[in-house]
Image (tube, rainbow, N blue to C red):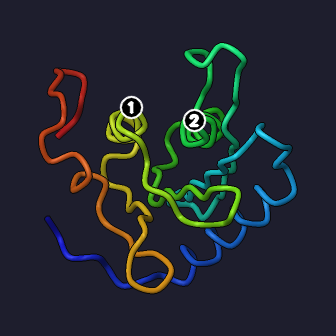
Amino acid sequence: MTAPLRLDPSHAEAVAEARRFIAARHRGDWHSVASVVLTASGARYMGVNLDSTLPRASVCAEPVALGMAMAADPDDRVVFCAAVNRRGEVIPPCGPCRELMLDYAPHALVAVPGEGDFVTIPMRDLMPTAYKHDRRKP
């Protein structure tokens, strides 16, 4: 595993925006996580989790933010991803989100809890033994 990377100011700004985003949108048990995605062009996309009364139908915040980025410009490479909970704490992506991010943002840096506020690590380090598929690019 690669050592955590030096914090880029744009990553700290993106996480701060995600914190403001979830604070403005959190409603009781609904929308408890926000995610932010940065692309190579500098675009920033936000998402919130979509809770459902049928738990299996719930959607995490990371796929929502990734979907916003892909809908806007599928050729603009995702370079950074982060998620925060309703308390504003950086949280790591769950297993299915890691798999999805590995498909759509394999070279991105991901915010995870760490020394100080958070650290960034390469997406591939979160999935050292990821599922292999012919469509997944090396």
Where 51 sits versus 61, above or below? Answer: above
Q: Residue at x 51, y 80 (%)?
A: 117
Q: Secondary structure at mark 2?
A: loop
Question: What is the distance, in whole Å, between disc 1 and disc 2 at their CAs?
Answer: 9 Å
Residue drawn 44% across the image and 59% down it: 79
Query: Is the Cβ of the residue at disc 1 closer than 8 Å to that at disc 2?
Result: yes
Mark 2 closeness class: few <14, some 14–19, many ≥20 residues within 10 Å = many
The amino acid sitting under disc 2 is Cys
Which quadrant: the N terminus?
Answer: bottom left
Image quarter of the C terminus? top left
- Front-most of residues 39 and 113: 113
Left or right placement of residue 45 versus residue 134 in this view: right
SS at circle 1: helix
Q: Is residue 4 left or right of residue 7?
A: left
Residue 104 in picture, x, y percent from top left: 40, 38
Quickly name the residue at label 1: 96
- In-front residue for pair 24/64: 24
Residue highlighted by disc 2: 60
Q: Residues within 10 Å of mark 1 (few under 14, many from 20)?
A: few
Picture quadrant where residue 83 is located: bottom right
Query: What type is the residue that disc 1 sits on?
Result: Pro
44 to 63, vertically: above or below: below
Q: Based on the displayed image, in which of its 4 quarters is residue 52 positioned?
A: top right
Precedes in sequence: disc 1 or disc 2: 2
Vertical placement of 123 versus 98: above or below? below
Disc number for residue 135: none
Residue 58 % position (x, y): 62, 23
Residue 112 picture location, percent across and down = 41, 64
Question: At 56% across and 59% down in the image, what residue appears?
Answer: 38
Give the answer, above or below, for where 127 lies relative to 131.
Answer: below
